[in-house]
Image: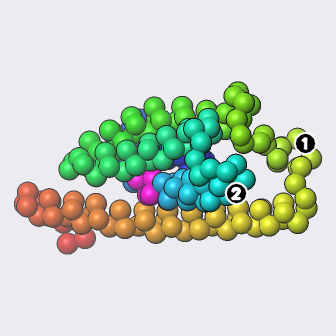
């Protein structure tokens, strides 16, 4: 969910200020966010089968998380379907900004509706309701996931920058303009 919020913020900055790097960052985040959302739905289904006796229920949190996956996929496909990178960035920004409404729905769904999911086990102001060894393992894995996300997003950002700059150099050559550094 936080990756989607970051993606929407970068897309909004790119759209509002015509900042190409912010738009490229939003594109780089989208793939990693979609992968983590897909993994959470699949592993949650594996956990849900022995716990609830079914692979899937139309629970508020599960359904809104599935919508989040569709928003990520829509953002990725929308940007891929438009040839002009600037237009693709603007269209993706609109989708990301509108889709960010889903994030608080996912987060508060267990409080708003009677669902199968439990409430928060870690609170900012309260004591965690998890056993200390489980909490330590979860925090280590959380840090590992964030480090992985940062590394993959930055690598993907590098490739997006190289691809767009390569295309810009080709367009400049075709228009007869001198290349940078030449």
Q: Is residue 32 above or below residue 126?
A: below
Residue found farthest to the front: 53
Query: Would you say residue 82 is visible in this rendering?
Result: yes
- Which quadrant would the C terminus be assigned to in this image? bottom left
**In the foreground, 112 or 122:** 112
Which residues are drawn in magenta?
A: 26-32
Query: Would you say residue 29 is visible in this rendering?
Result: no
Q: Position of residue 101 (x, y in %)?
A: 54, 31
Q: In the image, 84: left or right of 125? A: left
Is residue 30 inside the magenta stretch? yes
In what element is the residue under mark 1? loop
Marks 2, 1: nearer the viewer = 2
Q: Which residue occupies 33% across, 39% down?
A: 90
Q: Which residue occupies 59% across, 52% down?
A: 55
Q: In the image, 6: left or right of 158? A: right
Mark 2 in CB contact with mark 1 (< 8 angstroms) = no
Q: Which residue is mark 1?
A: 126
Is residue 77 inside the magenta stretch? no
């Amino acid at each position: 969910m936080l990756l989607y919020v970051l993606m929407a913020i970068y897309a909004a900055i790119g759209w509002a200020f015509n900042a190409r790097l912010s738009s490229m960052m939003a594109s780089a985040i989208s793939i990693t966010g979609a992968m983590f959302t897909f993994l959470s739905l699949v592993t949650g289904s594996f956990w849900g089968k022995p716990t609830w006796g079914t692979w899937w229920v139309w629970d508020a949190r599960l359904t809104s998380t599935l919508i989040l996956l569709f928003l990520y996929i829509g953002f990725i496909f929308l940007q891929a379907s438009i040839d002009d990178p600037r237009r693709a960035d603007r269209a993706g920004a609109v989708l990301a900004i509108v889709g960010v409404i889903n994030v608080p729905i996912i987060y508060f769904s267990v409080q708003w509706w009677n669902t199968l999911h439990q409430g928060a086990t870690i609170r900012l102001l309260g004591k965690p309701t998890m056993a200390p060894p489980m909490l330590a393992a979860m925090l280590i894995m959380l840090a590992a996931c964030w480090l992985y996300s940062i590394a993959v997003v930055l690598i993907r950002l590098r490739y997006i920058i190289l691809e767009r700059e390569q295309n810009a150099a080709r367009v400049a050559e075709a228009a007869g303009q001198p290349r940078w550094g030449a």
